[in-house]
Amino acid sequence: MKSYEELRAKYSFLSGVDSFDCGIGWLPLISEFCAKLEALRLGPIKVMQVKEKFGELRFYVDNVPKDKLEVFEKTLWEAANLSVKTCERCGQPGRIIAINKGMRIITLCEECEKKA
Protein backbone atom coordinates (compact mmCIF):
# COMPACT_ATOMS: atom_id res chain seq x y z
CA MET A 1 0.00 0.00 0.00
CA LYS A 2 1.22 3.44 -0.91
CA SER A 3 -1.68 5.56 0.31
CA TYR A 4 -4.67 5.59 2.61
CA GLU A 5 -6.89 5.83 -0.50
CA GLU A 6 -5.56 2.45 -1.69
CA LEU A 7 -6.24 1.01 1.74
CA ARG A 8 -9.82 2.35 1.73
CA ALA A 9 -10.37 0.83 -1.73
CA LYS A 10 -9.09 -2.58 -0.61
CA TYR A 11 -11.19 -2.93 2.57
CA SER A 12 -14.91 -2.18 2.32
CA PHE A 13 -15.18 -1.73 6.10
CA LEU A 14 -13.09 1.46 5.71
CA SER A 15 -15.63 3.11 3.37
CA GLY A 16 -17.04 5.23 6.22
CA VAL A 17 -13.66 6.76 7.07
CA ASP A 18 -13.57 10.30 5.65
CA SER A 19 -9.92 10.85 6.50
CA PHE A 20 -7.11 9.07 8.26
CA ASP A 21 -6.05 11.53 10.94
CA CYS A 22 -2.56 10.15 11.36
CA GLY A 23 0.72 10.21 9.50
CA ILE A 24 1.70 8.05 6.55
CA GLY A 25 4.32 6.30 8.71
CA TRP A 26 1.55 4.23 10.26
CA LEU A 27 0.20 3.07 6.88
CA PRO A 28 1.93 -0.36 7.04
CA LEU A 29 0.72 -0.84 10.62
CA ILE A 30 -2.85 0.06 9.70
CA SER A 31 -2.69 -2.14 6.59
CA GLU A 32 -1.55 -5.10 8.69
CA PHE A 33 -4.32 -4.43 11.23
CA CYS A 34 -6.94 -4.33 8.45
CA ALA A 35 -5.67 -7.63 7.02
CA LYS A 36 -6.04 -9.19 10.49
CA LEU A 37 -9.57 -7.78 10.81
CA GLU A 38 -10.50 -9.26 7.46
CA ALA A 39 -9.06 -12.65 8.50
CA LEU A 40 -11.17 -12.59 11.68
CA ARG A 41 -14.33 -12.60 9.55
CA LEU A 42 -16.16 -10.21 11.84
CA GLY A 43 -19.07 -9.72 9.49
CA PRO A 44 -20.40 -6.31 8.45
CA ILE A 45 -18.24 -4.12 10.69
CA LYS A 46 -17.76 -0.48 9.83
CA VAL A 47 -14.73 1.59 10.78
CA MET A 48 -15.92 5.10 11.53
CA GLN A 49 -12.65 6.84 12.38
CA VAL A 50 -8.90 6.20 12.29
CA LYS A 51 -6.68 8.68 14.10
CA GLU A 52 -3.78 9.41 16.37
CA LYS A 53 -4.59 10.44 19.91
CA PHE A 54 -1.90 11.04 22.54
CA GLY A 55 0.66 9.36 20.28
CA GLU A 56 -1.37 6.18 19.86
CA LEU A 57 -3.36 4.72 16.97
CA ARG A 58 -7.12 4.74 17.54
CA PHE A 59 -9.81 2.92 15.57
CA TYR A 60 -13.49 3.59 16.18
CA VAL A 61 -15.59 0.68 14.91
CA ASP A 62 -19.30 -0.17 14.79
CA ASN A 63 -21.01 -3.56 14.59
CA VAL A 64 -18.36 -5.83 16.07
CA PRO A 65 -20.21 -9.07 16.98
CA LYS A 66 -20.29 -9.67 20.73
CA ASP A 67 -18.92 -13.18 20.32
CA LYS A 68 -15.83 -11.78 18.57
CA LEU A 69 -15.35 -8.65 20.67
CA GLU A 70 -12.54 -10.12 22.78
CA VAL A 71 -10.41 -11.18 19.79
CA PHE A 72 -11.13 -7.85 18.07
CA GLU A 73 -10.00 -5.89 21.14
CA LYS A 74 -6.84 -8.00 21.44
CA THR A 75 -6.00 -7.35 17.79
CA LEU A 76 -6.69 -3.63 18.22
CA TRP A 77 -4.54 -3.50 21.37
CA GLU A 78 -1.65 -5.11 19.47
CA ALA A 79 -1.85 -2.44 16.74
CA ALA A 80 -2.10 0.38 19.30
CA ASN A 81 0.88 -1.05 21.19
CA LEU A 82 2.95 -1.10 17.99
CA SER A 83 1.92 2.47 17.14
CA VAL A 84 3.55 3.92 20.26
CA LYS A 85 6.83 2.38 19.08
CA THR A 86 6.51 3.48 15.42
CA CYS A 87 7.17 6.96 14.03
CA GLU A 88 3.91 8.33 12.72
CA ARG A 89 5.70 10.31 10.01
CA CYS A 90 8.20 7.82 8.53
CA GLY A 91 7.47 4.39 10.05
CA GLN A 92 10.88 3.94 11.69
CA PRO A 93 11.15 2.90 15.37
CA GLY A 94 10.00 5.78 17.54
CA ARG A 95 8.81 6.86 20.95
CA ILE A 96 6.12 9.06 22.40
CA ILE A 97 7.26 12.65 22.85
CA ALA A 98 5.71 16.04 23.61
CA ILE A 99 6.09 18.78 21.00
CA ASN A 100 4.90 22.38 20.70
CA LYS A 101 5.89 23.19 24.27
CA GLY A 102 4.10 20.10 25.54
CA MET A 103 0.82 20.91 23.81
CA ARG A 104 0.92 17.85 21.53
CA ILE A 105 1.90 14.26 22.20
CA ILE A 106 3.07 12.27 19.20
CA THR A 107 5.17 9.21 18.35
CA LEU A 108 8.30 10.10 16.38
CA CYS A 109 11.74 8.71 15.60
CA GLU A 110 14.85 10.70 16.51
CA GLU A 111 15.22 12.11 12.99
CA CYS A 112 11.60 13.29 12.72
CA GLU A 113 11.76 14.67 16.25
CA LYS A 114 14.57 17.00 15.13
CA LYS A 115 12.21 18.37 12.45
CA ALA A 116 9.22 18.75 14.76
Image (cartoon, rainbow, N blue to C red):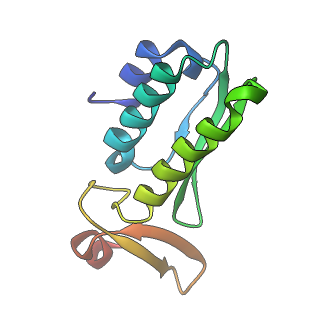
Number of numbered labels in the structure image: 0
Residue 61 position within the rendered picture, expressed as x and y whole percent measured from the top left: 69, 32
Residue 59 position within the rendered picture, expressed as x and y whole percent measured from the top left: 61, 42
Residue 24 position within the rendered picture, expressed as x and y whole percent measured from the top left: 35, 45
Point out the residue furthest to the front here. Answer: 67
Q: Residue at x 43, y 14 (%)?
A: 9
84 sits to left or right of 115: right
**Viewer-proximal residue, 80 or 5?**
80
**Viewer-proximal residue, 25 or 76?**
76
**Rendered-image quadrant of the N terminus:** top left
Does residue 89 lie above or below 48 as drawn? below
**Rendered-image quadrant of the C terminus:** bottom left
Q: Residue at x 67, y 20 (%)?
A: 45
Quarter residue 28 falls in: top left
23 sits to left or right of 61: left
Does residue 15 lie above or below 19 as drawn? above
Quarter residue 10 falls in: top left
1 sits to left or right of 55: left
**Viewer-proximal residue, 59 or 66?**
66
Residue 39 position within the rendered picture, expressed as x and y whole percent measured from the top left: 45, 21
Quarter residue 109 falls in: bottom left
Point out the residue furthest to the bottom here. Answer: 101
Does residue 62 lie above or below 83 as drawn? above
Q: Residue at x 51, y 54 (%)?
A: 80
**Viewer-proximal residue, 28 or 67?**
67
Q: Residue at x 73, y 27 (%)?
A: 67
